[in-house]
Image (tube, rainbow, N blue to C red):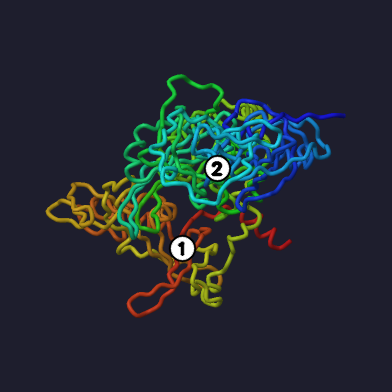
Amino acid sequence: MSINLTTNAIPAINGGDVNSKPLVQVLDIKLIGSTQERYRLLISDSVATQHAMLATQLNDRIKSGRVRIGSVVQLIDYIRSTVQNRTIVVVLNMETIIQECGTIGKPNMLPESDLLPQKPVPSITSGHPSLKKKNTVGKTSTFQDSADSTDSFRPIIQPPYQPPPVYKNHGAIMKNEAAARIIPIAALNPYQGRWAIKARVTAKGDIRRYNNARGDGKVFSFDLLDSDGGEIRATCFNSAADRFYDAIEVGKVYVLSKGNLKPAQKNFNHLQNEWEIFLDTSSSLDQCPDEDLSIPRQKFSFRPISEIEDAESNAILDVIGVVVGVDPSVPILRKNGMETQKRTVSMKDESGRSVEVTLWGDFCNREGQQLQELVDAGNFPTLAVKAGKVNDFSGKTIGTISSTLLFVNPDFPEAKRLSDWYRRVGKDAASHSISKEVVLPAKNEIRKTISQIKDEGLGRSEKPDWITVKATVSFVKTDPFCYTACPLTVGDRRCNRKVTNSSSRWRCDRCDREFEECDFRYLLQMQVQDHSGVTWVTAFQECGEEIMGCRAEELYRWRYEQRGGEDDDGGGRFGEAIRKCLFSEFVLRLKVKEEVYGDEQRVKITVAKAEKVNYSSEAKYLLGMIS
């Protein structure tokens, strides 16, 4: 069967024609790229050849064999760029016409000078307009400024001399001010000269300030999604952050151009794109006045909860489920001494598994409070988590990070399906939690006895040891059992530094402020024991509340204020609370770490989690250990 490729397709493309849909043949395919697979093709129009980059969304055409060496394809959508005097064609869409075929014509690689329109090369005949030269077939030819002339004319004589100075400087070159062509995000690559994308902002981070060797600075990022499902992150530093931060609104559609493409920083960027856009003050960002319904508002890749059980720690993923429980928001003391809020949400799905989602910071009081009100009212909403982080601290849990997005009762097909399932059978269906193991401890929850802390030298390595013990409270140190803390908020966190009392007012040296009321926070030191031994442990705010059964402020007032300032160490409600705590059994999650006090090294044991013994679960655990 005779096959005709599009005549002069390669010169036309190199001349700037990107509107035709030529038939070309694939002569070679090469896999390139280290961080992301990219394919480079050698295409032919039967006479000339040209290298072309394949957009990543077309990689499956190569992998499936739909496009192979010898295939005849029709270029549907493509762009042309020039990088370092080289022409690069990026194929965005194409159709396979013939899957296999022998080489058509006698294609030759065009010389580099023929890839781009060239300036005329002077010869001995070009100095005078009347001089012409006969070619081999008897026709006359003159030098033209067009690139097409290079195919039809080859001078017979060209003297070996340098062009005169006039050829070195032709004056200013007109700048191309035409609007850049909008391309899919998936087709972006650093080889393109001029490009534009049309996309919706799906997430926007806060401005973060930093300090490094080059001085102070600020940065923020936002995520973009286009109609083809491509995602990419854009980042703005300093003056660019000042210019674009207020202009960016989540959910709006923008046309963005004149940005710099650099490799994505995967430590901070979870999107499935090897590139990241960096904007500067010369970049262009224009909001589209009309809504574009072809661009989705979000892109999700939901994973069943059963798959999260095998996911790697720190993986970023999307999950959706029905919320079946919401814990109250509690303050947590971070390693930097700052306090934040934490709230745990339990949800399940059709896979027969449930998982705990830990909300941090503002998520607790926004979506977390909304979820708690719905559950308390007897409603069980669906929750979609975009970009949650997998943790394996206690089984597998999902935690929020700065780029996480939460959607309560979203209008998604997946959410409607889950709601219907929960109403029909899910409410009464049993599910296994991948976050809390009630029969056997999670792989990093190692059950120990108190004597093993010393016998095994726990806490003396570089990293702390985390263990679980079942122990009884045998003694509580009542002086002090709490401290007075600063109630002010620094940024989005409580200060919580210790404050001093002066003339009936409290003062925080860190905040340099005075106030009438302060907070009371637990600093509870106590002895716990089991059948093997006894040890001292320290419990802070939320663990102290679990052990004592009341807030630190209440215990403080019971001790001092109800007796007119006298110490009520042994009687009244204070003494009753202490006696009620003694000889209570708890399952304690302990952090064991050696620290230096003065010149002496001591092993410090901190209570990270305290739960009263559930004798049913404990019996199941013991039976599991026996079996």
Residue 299 on image: x %, y %: 57, 34
- Give me the residue at 38% from left, 75% from top: 596
- The extreme top residue here reads 290
Viewer-proximal residue among 444 and 325: 444
Amino acid type, label 2: Asn
| Disc number for residue 246 | none
Label 1's element? strand
Judging by the rendered image, the residue that carries numbered circle 1 is 473
**Residue 324 visible in the picture:** no
Q: Quadrant of the C terminus?
A: bottom right
Name the outermost residue toward the left.
503
Crowd class of label 2 (few under 14; some 14 to 19; many from 20; radius 10 Å): some
Q: CA distance from mark 1 to mark 2?
A: 63 Å
Residue 139 picture quarter: top right
Q: Is residue 515 left or right of residue 538?
A: left
Q: Is residue 384 above or below residue 442?
A: above
Which of the two labelled residues, at mark 1 and mark 2, occupies the earlier sequence position?
Answer: 2
